[in-house]
Image (tube, rainbow, N blue to C red):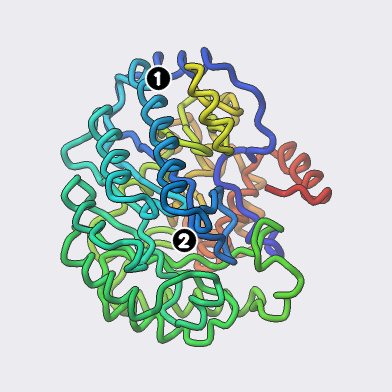
Amino acid sequence: LKKEPGIMSFAYPYVGLWGVLNEEEVKDAWYSLQESHGGALYIHIPFCLSKCSFCDYASNYVGQNKNNKRSKIFKLYIDAIEREIKLLTPIIKKVKFDAIYFGGGTPTIFYEKDLERIIKLVISNFQVSPSAEISIEIYPWKKMLQDKLKLLKNIGVNRVSIGVQDFDDKVIAFTGRKYTGDEATKIVTEAMKLFNTVNIDLICGLPKQEKWQQTLEKTINLNPQQVTVQPFSNRHSGVKFHNQKYKNLLPDLDQIIKEYTLAYQMLTDAGYTQTSRHLFVKGGEHKYERKISKSIVRLGIGAHSISLLPKLTYKNFTTLKEYQDTIKIGKLPIEKGFRIGADEAMRSYLFYSLGADCGRLSLNEKEFLEKFGLRVQDKFSDEVQALEKEGLIKISDDKIDLTPEGIYFTSVLQRTFYNPEFIRKKEKIYLKGRLS
């Protein structure tokens, strides 16, 4: 597993192994939910100008479309979002959301009227805590943003995550992005004046990343409240850099770990505290991430979004056509799902606790005991011993701490706690070249 740490999954178990879930099962799961204060809400905006060379997320590329055609595409999608919300509100009455995340794709590719409409639709139709974190991903290109930052502030957004990735113009251009390092710097500075929390998103391990230390210095000088550092994952053919022609340009695993370690050292020396594999904070917390790491109820809206309930998880259709066509006939756009039994509930909980994108740095044995009636190291003794032997965790009676190496290899820890049958099935799919 440590030879392929980049092969990560973002839902338990692998989505490729999920099966059919009918709409009534999903409705019953929401109806039977006990009153919950503190749910997480995710809205997927599946549009980008073009495909960035490091990305494999679900998105539709509209950079070549003229404005009038793009405007129509956006309107049709938001119309579908509105219909989905109308289908959901009667069944989701017991959840108050205190973490809302607009992700993508590129949410700020929307025109101002589209951004205002979709955010207001969400906030006005669900129970939202007065202190809710309302977060959105930002593409730092002045031509795209114009006056959108002020608009976002005025309609309730209080946290922005700015996808800088690197401040070096050579790296930015090579990955297919439009802005410059200076442009990104100005946008971060403007955002710092407007929002409670600004996060700068960085990626280490990219080709031509020869000025990584300078990028970190620039980030620290800007002094955002939060910084995320994502090691580049060349995990499958959906990533443009996966092509053989880039092979000699990609740093090896040791180099990526070296860059990641440098980021850890410089950020912690600058007063940041690491709270997960990738997140470093100076003040407050990222509420949405914290909810996910605790397997809190999550509602996903939009194409490709994933929802999580105590006894099942499910995802919406990925393609715009399937998503929109299903909603048009008055049905929830559920593509597939997974029923979570007693044993799988424990494995699922550990998956999200250790999530490579949102996991914590330790497993609380008291918390697990209260939830499931036994400790992690008693239920999964073989797995825990194997991870300890590899030097990825440190065990005590009340918790299991990730070591520095374990923090980097959180995807390895995740997969170690998978149902072994799922691992075997997934590896068969992987060997056939259909890894998703």
Res 376 label? none
Q: Is residue 370 visible?
A: no
Q: Is residue 255 above or below residue 102?
A: below
Identity, as a three-letter code, of the amino acid under mark 1:
Leu
Residue depth check, mark 1 versus mark 2: number of the one nearer the observer? 1
Residue 293 image position (x, y, % from top left): 42, 45
The residue drawn where x is 60% and y is 21% is 21
Query: 321 or 175, which is in the foreground?
Result: 321
Quadrant of the image containing the N terminus: bottom right
Residue labelled with disc 2? 277
Identity, as a three-letter code, of the amino acid under mark 2:
Arg
Q: Secondary structure at mark 1?
A: helix
Residue labelled with disc 1? 87
Q: Mark 2, residues whose alpha carbon is within 10 Å: few (<14), some, or many (≥20)? A: many
Q: Is residue 57 visible?
A: yes
The residue drawn where x is 66% and y is 59% is 235
Q: Residue 39 is drawn in which quadrant?
A: top left
Query: 300 or 172, which is in the foreground?
Result: 172
Q: Secondary structure at mark 2?
A: loop
The residue drawn where x is 53% and y is 41% is 376
